[in-house]
Image (cartoon, rainbow, N blue to C red):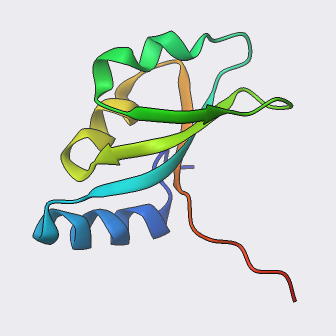
Amino acid sequence: MPKISPELMTRIESARAETQEIPVIVTLAPGTDAAVLDSTGIKVGRGMENIPAVAGSVAAEDVAKLAELTEVVRVEYDGEMHAL
């Protein structure tokens, strides 16, 4: 399973063209402190309480830095959710 979700890859291509940041959810390996992300360019907005993950935004060109970290399990696009 790739670390970067397919939807996020699509968003990266669009964001590169517009040089904007992308909202992401970064799932970390159990027991990992979010401080390992400090060097990756992510702007952490909030941490998750029940799972080892954070939500934030990152420049399109910095997504690969996140995925390269061994402590990162997955990087996904943080889109809006709508209830039916």
Is 27 positioned to the left or the right of 9 in the image? right
Q: Residue at x 66, y 21 (%)?
A: 29
Q: In which quarter of the image is residue 26?
A: top right
Q: What residue occupies the far front of the structure in this picture?
A: 45
Q: Which residue is drawn at 84% across and 81% down?
A: 83
Q: Position of residue 82 (x, y in %)?
A: 75, 80
Q: In this view, does 43 lie above or below 4?
A: above
Is 31 positioned to the left or the right of 44 in the image? right
Q: In which quarter of the image is residue 54?
A: top right
Q: Where is residue 6 in the image (x, y as percent from the top left)?
A: 46, 66
Q: Which residue is drawn at 45% across and 54% down?
A: 23
Q: Is residue 13 above or below residue 70?
A: below
Q: Which residue is drawn at 28% across and 30% down?
A: 41
Q: Where is residue 64 in the image (x, y as percent from the top left)?
A: 29, 39
Is 19 positioned to the left or the right of 74 in the image? left
Q: Where is residue 45 in the image (x, y as percent from the top left)?
A: 53, 37
